[in-house]
Image: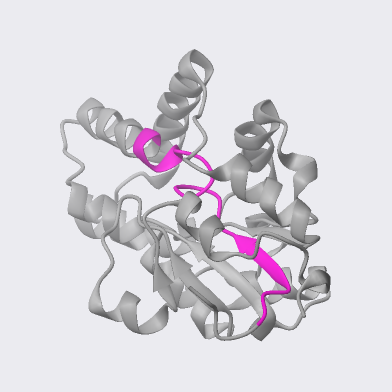
Amino acid sequence: MSFPRIVKAVVFDMDGLLVDTETVVYRAMQRAAGQIGGEMPFDTFQRMVGLQHAHSDPILVEHFGEGFNLDAWSEAVSGHFQGEMLEAGIALKAGVVEILDQLDVMGLPRAIATSSRLAAVEQCLGPHGLLDRFHALITRDIQTRGKPHPEPFLKAAEALGVAPEDCLALEDSHNGVRSASSAGMMTVMVPDMLDPTEEMHDLCVRIARDLHEVREWLPGQPYSAIP
């Protein structure tokens, strides 16, 4: 497969794309809901994937009702998440190391654009020794408008010094795809907890089964060596 334009940089989401955090978060939410005698339906969780708290909190209030204690909820979910992460760690998704190795060969800069905070990025990627393999980390801490707004991806392109239209964006969530596509990037969805919809097919240049497949679409040599 060839992309519409030469890829000059790659911007990755993190949760659900680089690391298998979404399944851990969902289990944490199920446990937190059980503690208060409630439930966390999968379709409700799916609506929140890829969103910052400012956008996901209203979904929680809609589900649990007015007066729902968001601070207590966040503390409970975080506690369950941290407990599982400390016990078993957070696994890398398939193909992460291989695609980063390929980008090294190609000499392409890469960034992360995530709705998570820097501390979470360090917790998830640090143990795998991957932090220094990215040239920029665009976390929630430095975003004024999160996904699905294009700002996270525009900030990533700016940090890498590459025009957004020359960047390949890799996302697993619908809101992430909307963010990357509206930033003007060549967007590939690598589904995790969410299936690609007709809208996703329209916004993406391709849907990939995993990062191994994305790597196969990239040249096997530096772009400077391609006639």
User: Which residue is found at the position 35% from the left and 31% from the top?
Assistant: 28
* Residue 7 position within the rendered picture, expressed as x and y whole percent measured from the top left: 67, 75
Relative side of 99 to 174, left or right: right
User: Can residue 65 be spotted in the picture?
Assistant: no
User: Which residue is found at the position 49% from the left and 52% from the top?
Assistant: 211
Relative side of 167 to 160, left or right: left
Say which of 86 and 80 sits in front.
86
Say which of 218 and 194 sits in front.
218
* Residue 54 position within the rendered picture, expressed as x and y whole percent measured from the top left: 47, 62
User: Which residue is found at the position 29% from the left and 60% from the top?
Assistant: 47
The quadrant of the rendering that contains the C terminus is bottom right
Residue 224 picture quarter: bottom right
* Residue 87 position within the rendered picture, expressed as x and y whole percent measured from the top left: 48, 13
| Above or below, 100 relative to 218 | above
Residue 160 picture quarter: bottom right
Find the magenta span and give its range.
6-24
Say which of 198 and 65 sits in front.
198
| Above or below, 168 relative to 34 | below
Asked whether 103 falls inside the magenta stretch, the response is no
* Residue 1 position within the rendered picture, expressed as x and y whole percent measured from the top left: 48, 73
| Above or below, 81 relative to 64 | above
Relative side of 97 to 173, left or right: right
Relative side of 55 to 31, left or right: right
Residue 12 picture quarter: bottom right
User: Can residue 84 be spotted in the picture?
Assistant: yes
Which residue is the extreme one toward the top? 87
Number of marks in the rendered image: 0
User: Which residue is found at the position 44% from the left and 29% from the top?
Assistant: 81
